[in-house]
Amino acid sequence: MTSSYRSPLNEGVSVAAENEFKPVELGPIRLETPVVLAPMAGVTDWPFRSLCLDWGAGRYVNQMIPARALVEENALTWKLAEFGPKEPLRAVQLYGPDPEEEPI
């Protein structure tokens, strides 16, 4: 696959011109490409995010991770929260069903 690949869904969409979009600044972080991949449970693991980075995504967020499983040291959940070697900025979306639940 090359950078000129077009799916039937986007074949009529023109490629953004250089400098068409202004960089986005979030505090000390500057996103040259104003595209951020949203977290998707079971999808946005580090191999997928690596592909997105190769295709020009500005930033990305790891898949949604249950906070309770991290607190309970669930090994599989910690594996899901891993980042790849090409990911200098890291973000995880944590979720939990009950904010009133007693901590361990």
Image (cartoon, rainbow, N blue to C red):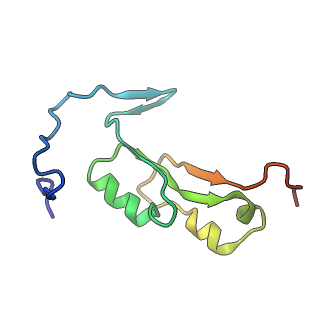
Q: Nearer the viewer, residue 89 or 81?
A: 81
Which residue does the image show at 14% across and 43% down from the upper left? 13
Which residue does the image show at 40% across and 58% down from the upper left? 49
Indicate the position of residue 40 as horizontal and vertical percent values: 48, 57
Question: Image check: 27 left or right of 56?
Answer: right
Q: Nearer the viewer, residue 98 or 77?
A: 98
Image quadrant holding the N terminus, namely: bottom left
Q: Is residue 43 above or below residue 28?
A: below
Which residue does the image show at 45% across and 49% down from the upper left? 38
Image quadrant holding the C terminus, namely: bottom right
Question: Image check: 9 left or right of 44?
Answer: left
Which corner quadrant of the image does residue 50 belong to?
bottom left
Q: Residue furthest bottom?
A: 76
Question: Image check: 41 left or right of 95?
Answer: left
Q: Is residue 89 above or below residue 70?
A: above
Which corner quadrant of the image does residue 23 belong to?
top left
Indicate the position of residue 96 as horizontal and vertical percent values: 71, 55
Which residue does the image show at 44% across and 64% down from the upper left? 43
Indicate the position of residue 68 as horizontal and vertical percent values: 75, 61
Indicate the position of residue 69 as horizontal and vertical percent values: 72, 65
Question: Image check: 6 left or right of 52?
Answer: left
Q: How many marks?
A: 0
